[in-house]
Amino acid sequence: MKFKLLAGAAMAAVFAASGASAQDAGWYGAMDLGYHWPEGLETGSSNNGPGGAGYNWEFSQDDDWAGFARLGYQLNPNWRVELEGGYRPGDISSVRGAPGSAIAGLCTPGVVRTAAAPNCGSPNGDVEAWTIMGNVIYDIAPGAVINPFIGAGVGVNHVKMDVTGQFATTPGPFTAANPAIQNLSIDDDDTALAYQLLAGLAWQATDRLDVDLTYRYLGGSDLDFASTGSASLQPGVFSGDYRDQSVTVGLRYSFASPAAPPPPPPQIGRASCRERV
């Protein structure tokens, strides 16, 4: 008899613990701030260069900060969905052509190069990316103090490119129609389908507040940016995909009431005299 009572108490404790780890369904809001490192836009041009091939250039950015705002809904203890808006800025660090390109890329506009000083620095400009994503997230250990999670999202990425630079190499001979210094500018934006993969850890600070450490990988379809060249150097439209990685720390606040505490496990009383006989 005592064994049956102990077994029943153990089972009740197990169900009570699992009930405590479950979270009520409901809405939540979150803000994330962190760091991102773009992988660079590897592009090809619509027009050919002097050598008869396209301008295959990589537009590289400096690493910078990133911010996200999220509105989500907890469907059950393991699954939640959310709408996320993101912003990723970054200055242009370089624009380089593929090996063997007739035009090696872009450098600082207006700098006169000589044999003694052949370099002219980096081009000017920046690239900004705004994303709107619908995410689906799976909580691996809901209700635990440290809860790992994974997820994926789909949406759109709106990228604004503002770049001005001097053609790093200008094929001669130099004439009035082919001056030694020629600039290219891009001031354009485009929107493309995007996806992202997520993984992270959530720390349950209170019944309503979680601290999220989140890694995101962003990719998507090609973006198009029109350019304005100089004289005979007119690359046309540059096309390429935007890829980025980021790590953020965020606060996630649940608007739903915390789950009710589970009932206490049954008490094991002394066995009656008859049971002891």
Image (cartoon, rainbow, N blue to C red):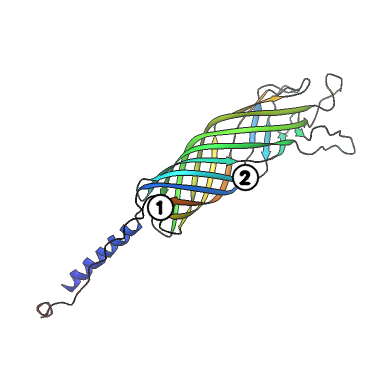
Tell me the amino acid under the disc marked 2: Trp
Tell me the amino acid under the disc marked 1: Ile
Q: Image quadrant of residue 169? A: top right
Q: Image quadrant of residue 102? A: top right
Vertical side of 20 occupied by 35: above or below: above
Q: Where residue 125 sits in the image (x, y, percent)?
A: 71, 36
Horizontal arrangement in the rendering, residue 151 relative to residue 46 (left or right): left
Tag 1 or tag 2, which sits nearer the N-term? 2
Q: Where residue 7 sits in the image (x, y, percent)?
A: 22, 67
Query: Would you name the residue on which mark 1 appears?
Result: 140
Question: Can residue 104 be seen in this snapshot?
Answer: no
The residue nearer to you, when weighing 258 against 198, is 258
Query: Would you name the residue on which mark 2 appears?
Result: 37
- Within-10-Å neighbours for mark 1: few <14, some 14–19, many 20+: some
What is the secondary structure assignment of the residue under circle 1?
loop
Q: Image quadrant of residue 241? A: top right
Vertical side of 130 occupied by 27: above or below: below
Residue occupying the point 72% across, 38% down: 94
Q: Which mark is residue 47?
A: none
The residue nearer to you, when weighing 48 against 217, is 217
